[in-house]
Amino acid sequence: MNQVVAETIAQLEGRKYNFSAGPAALPQAVLEQARDEMLDFRGEGASIMEVSHRGKLFMQVAEEAEADLRELLKVPANYKVMFLQGGARGQFAAVPMNLKGEKSGADYINSGHWAQSAIKEAQRYLDVNVAADGKNASFHTMPKQSDWRLSSDAAYLHYTPNETIGGLEFPFIPDSGDVPLVADMSSNILSRPIDVSKFGLIYAGSQKNIGPAGLTVVIVRDDLLNLGQSACPAVLDYNLQASKNSMYNTPPTYGWYLAGLVFKWLKTQGGLEAIDKINDRKSGKLYSAIDGSDFYHNPVDVSWRSRMNIPFTLAKPELDATFLSEADKEGFLYLQGHKAVGGMRASIYNAVPEHHVDALTSFMSEFERKYG
Amino acid sequence: MNQVVAETIAQLEGRKYNFSAGPAALPQAVLEQARDEMLDFRGEGASIMEVSHRGKLFMQVAEEAEADLRELLKVPANYKVMFLQGGARGQFAAVPMNLKGEKSGADYINSGHWAQSAIKEAQRYLDVNVAADGKNASFHTMPKQSDWRLSSDAAYLHYTPNETIGGLEFPFIPDSGDVPLVADMSSNILSRPIDVSKFGLIYAGSQKNIGPAGLTVVIVRDDLLNLGQSACPAVLDYNLQASKNSMYNTPPTYGWYLAGLVFKWLKTQGGLEAIDKINDRKSGKLYSAIDGSDFYHNPVDVSWRSRMNIPFTLAKPELDATFLSEADKEGFLYLQGHKAVGGMRASIYNAVPEHHVDALTSFMSEFERKYG
C-alpha cells in the first residue's frame, strides 16, 4: 500500500485519545506498518504470524528486535534478553523458582497493588521479608532507603519501579549491595534510560510500553541463570530458555514482531534520552493541570509521582460519571480509575502522543469551567 | 476498506502456498479482516490490541470467541474453556501439577516426539507409567488398545492425538475408563467433530488450527479443577484461571481475538462436519499422490496416518535440496521435513485451501517426471 493511501485510510479510521492502563495504546505508525504487511511480510507471501519460528525469516525478525532492545537499553553483554510468555504474573512465580538457589528467602519492597501481588505469589516458594512498606502511607510515598530493613542473606531484592494503579514511581534505583536487584518494570520500561548493570534481573509484561499483551521480556545477568529449583515448569526456566534463545517452546511470534516495530519506532523518536524528555513534558503538563486547580487532585507525594500512570479525583466525586461520559463524547478512552483507587486515571505511556495530553488538559479545564 | 479494494490489495500481495507445521497458515479472510480493523476495531477508535482486557469491548470479543468454540466443538456445560499462555509445553507441566491430586502417578502413551516431550516434563512432577509405546515400531504404528498396560491408580491417561513431526494420528479416542483422559490436541483440534465428554481435559497450542502462537486453549471438566499442587504457578492454575474467566493475568488479547475470527471462519465453512470432509479430501489427495508413485514414500501405517501433517521422502534423497529449491521457486513454503524425520513434510491444517494441495500434487508429479 502506498503512503498516500495509508495516510488517507488512517485519517478515515478515526483514531481516538487512548489512555488505557494496559493493554495500552501503540504507536499509530507501528499499527499502520503491521496492517500493511499483514498478508505478505517482506515478500514472503505469508504473514509473519504464519511462518515457522525456526525459519530464517522469523529468526531475523527476532534477532533484530533483540538487537534494537539491547541498543535502546544499552544492555551489557553479560545479560541475556528473553522473549517469553506468561506476563509479569508468570514472573511472580518464575523469579523465586529460578533465583532462590540455596537461600531460604528474599527481600521485597511493598509499594502497592503489584508489589503486593508479587509478594503473595513469592510466598508460595520462599520466605518473603518485606523490607520496606508504603502501606501506612497509603502508598502515596515510600520509606527512605536508609530505613529499609534488608535481610542479611536474601536471594534477591525485588521491587516494582512503577505502580500502575497507585501511580507511584521510584525516583531512584535501590542499592541492593551484593544481592541481585530484581525489578518488575512492566509499566515503565523504555520510558527513560536506565543503568541495566545495577540489576540482576528485569522483567516486563509487554502490554504497556513494548507491544501487545502475551509477551514478557526478561533481562537477566548470566550468573543468575543456573540456580533453579526443580519444580519450575520448563517454559519458565531461565537457564533453559536462555540456552534456546527463548525458543524452547514456540514463542509468541506476532507479539515479538510487534515489539520489534515498537523498538524501531522508539529509535526514530531519538531513543530513550529523547523519550525521557517527552515523558517529562507530558506528565508535567498533566500534573500542572491537576495541581493548578482545586477541582482536580492527585494524592501522591510529588517526588514519588509516576510519569506513566496518573490517577486523579474530582473535588465533587458525584460528577465522576458525568466526567467520564463527556470525555467519552470527546473521544477520550479508558479514563476511569482502577476500582481500588477510584476517580480517574490517565495512562500516558510512550505511545500516547503529547498532543493527546494537551487535548486532555484542555478538556479538563473546560469541564471544570462548566461544573467546577 | 471496501471489499473491492480489499480484494485487489490481496491479489497484489502475492500470497504463496504455505505448508508450515506451525506457526502455520491462517485463513486469508481472517488476515484481511484483521488488517482492515487494525487501527479501528468496531468504531472504538483503537485497535483491539490497544484496549483493556477488562473493558466491555474486549469482554465481548472474548465471550464471542468462547461461545463459537463451544458451539463448534459442542463443549458440554460442565466444562470450562480457558484461553491461557505458555503453549502446549506449558501444559506439559500444568497438567501434572493440576491433576496429580492424591495420586502418585499417571499413564502416558508414547506416540512420538511430542508425547515424549510431555512425558519428560511430567516425570518432574509425578511417576509416569508409559502404558503403550510406539518406539519399537519407529512410531509408524501404535499398539492396539487391548495391549496397553494401564495402571490401576493413575491420576489420568495422557495421549497425543496427532504427532506433528512423525505424521501419526490416532484413529480412535482411547477408552480410559473412570480415569480422566487428557489430550494434547495442538495439531488436530477443530479438524473434525469430537466427543468432548470422553475427555477430562483437552489442551492445544493455538499456532496450528486456532490462531497465532502465544495462546493456549484448555478445555477442562469441572470436577478436575481443584486438585492442584501448591507449587503450580498461579498463571497455570486451572482452578484460579477458570474462576477468573482466564483473566487472572492479562490474557494474550490479540491472539484471542484472532482465534475468534478463525472460529467464525470455521462456522462459515460449515463447521467441523464440513471441515472434516474437506480434510479427508485434502489428505486423501496428497496420500494418493505419494502412494501412487514409487518416487515418493510415507512410512506411516495407513490406518494411523495424520490428516494434518504428512511427511514424505524421495526415492533419491540426494534430490531433497533440488525438490525444495524448485518448490520454493513455484511458491511452496516450508516443505522441509523436521530434522528428526528428514525428507519433506506438508502440513495441511484447516486454513490450507484444497487448491493449494492440488497445486502441490501437480508440482510433485511434474518433479517426478523431470527427475524420477
Image (cartoon, coloured by chain):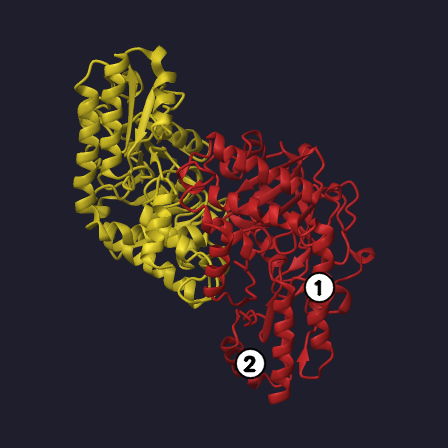
Chain colours: A yellow, B red
Report, in whole angstroms, how far the alpha carbon at label 1 lies from the one at label 2: 30 Å
Label 2, on which residue? B323
Determine the residue positioned at 68% across, 69% down. Answer: B138
Nearest to the observer: residue A307 or residue B116: A307
- Where is residue A59 shown, x and y percent of the image? 40, 63
Could you say which quadrant of the image residue B130 lies in? bottom right
Dot 2: chain letter: B
Secondary structure, mark 1, is loop
Q: Residues within 10 Å of mark 1 (few under 14, many from 20)?
A: some
Q: Mark 2, residues whose alpha carbon is within 10 Å: few (<14), some, or many (≥20)?
A: many
Find residue B100 and name its label: none
The answer to whether marks 1 and 2 sit on the same chain is: yes
Left or right of residue A136: residue B64: right
Q: To which residue does mark 1 refer?
A: B134
Q: Quadrant of the C terminus of chain B?
A: bottom right
- Is residue A230 positioned above or below A173 on the image? below
Q: Tag 1, which chain?
A: B
Above or below B115: residue B248: above
